[in-house]
Amino acid sequence: MTRSRRNETGELPLPHPPTAPRDNGSVPAPKKRTPRPPAPPPAGQEDLFARPLPPVPVPPRRVTHLDATEIGLSPVPLRHFGPADATDGFFYIVTTSSQADAMLAHGLSISPRTPVSLTERPGVMAWYVDMSEDMEAISDEGGVAILRLRRFMVNDLVENDPDHTRAYGVPCYFLTGVTRAAPI
C-alpha cells in the first residue's frame, strides 16, 4: 500500500503563514488616494503643441545696387600705399580709371554672378602690380585707379575669394550683394 502525503484532514503539510499582529478588533481607516502623475509620452514622441512655434526664417537680403555716397566710395592716390600697410576699416577696389569714374558717378552694380573684387589695404600694391603688367589694355582705359569704400557698410554682403587670397597672400573678397548670417 502506498503512503499518502496528506494528513488526516486531507491537507498538504505546508507551513502556516506568519501571523500579523492585530489591533483590538477596530477597522483601520481607509487611506487617502493620491492622483496618479500624468503618463509620460511614448518614447520618441513629444507633445507638438506644448512648445511655441519656431521663428519664421527670414530670406537673405539681396542688394543689386549701392550708392557711391552711402558706402563712402572715394578715390585714393597710389602714393598713400606702401608695402608695410596694416589693415584698416576700408575695402579697396583696384580697377581701370574709366570703370572707377563710372562707379563714382553711378554707384556699384553688384550681382552674385559678376561680383566686384575687393581687397584689404595690404593687398592693394599686389593687385596694382598685377593689373599694371598689361599696360596696353589699361592705357586705353586711362590707367589704373584705386577706390575705397567703408568696410562696415558692406561687410555682410561679401564672401571670401580663396583664389586671389592665395595668389596675393592677403585677404581678398567678392562683393556679391547677398547677405550672410555671420560677417567675415
Image (spheres, rainbow, N blue to C red):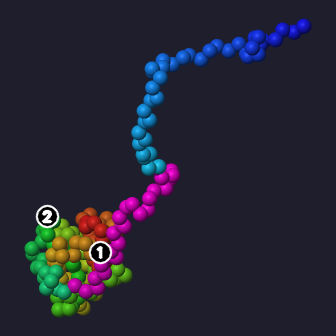
Q: Nearer the viewer, residue 165 or 107?
A: 107
Mark 1 residue type: Thr
- Kindly give the residue lying farthest to the front in the view shown: 25
Q: Quadrant of residue 56?
A: bottom left
Whether 34 is drawn above or below 26: the answer is below
Residue 57 magenta-drawn? yes
State which mark lies toward you, 1 or 2. Answer: 1
Q: Secondary structure at mark 1?
A: loop
The residue carrying mark 2 is 86
Q: Nearer the viewer, residue 67 or 127?
A: 67
Q: Is residue 150 visible?
A: yes
The residue carrying mark 1 is 179
Q: Nearer the viewer, residue 159 or 138?
A: 159
Q: Quadrant of residue 34?
A: top left
Residue 49 magenta-drawn? yes
Instruction: Give percent across and percent down for residue 17.
Output: 59, 17
Query: In this picture, which residue range is highlighted in magenta?
Result: 40-66
Instruction: Give percent across and percent down for residue 148.
Output: 16, 78
Circles 1 and 2: CB atoms closer than 8 Å = no
Give the position of the N terminus as an image quadrant.
top right
Q: Mark 1 and mark 2: span between their CA atoms? A: 26 Å
Q: Secondary structure at mark 2?
A: loop
Label located before the other in sequence (1 or 2)? 2
Instruction: Give percent across and percent down for residue 90.
Output: 16, 72
- Kindly give the residue lying farthest to the right in the view shown: 1
Instruction: Give percent across and percent down for residue 109.
Output: 27, 87
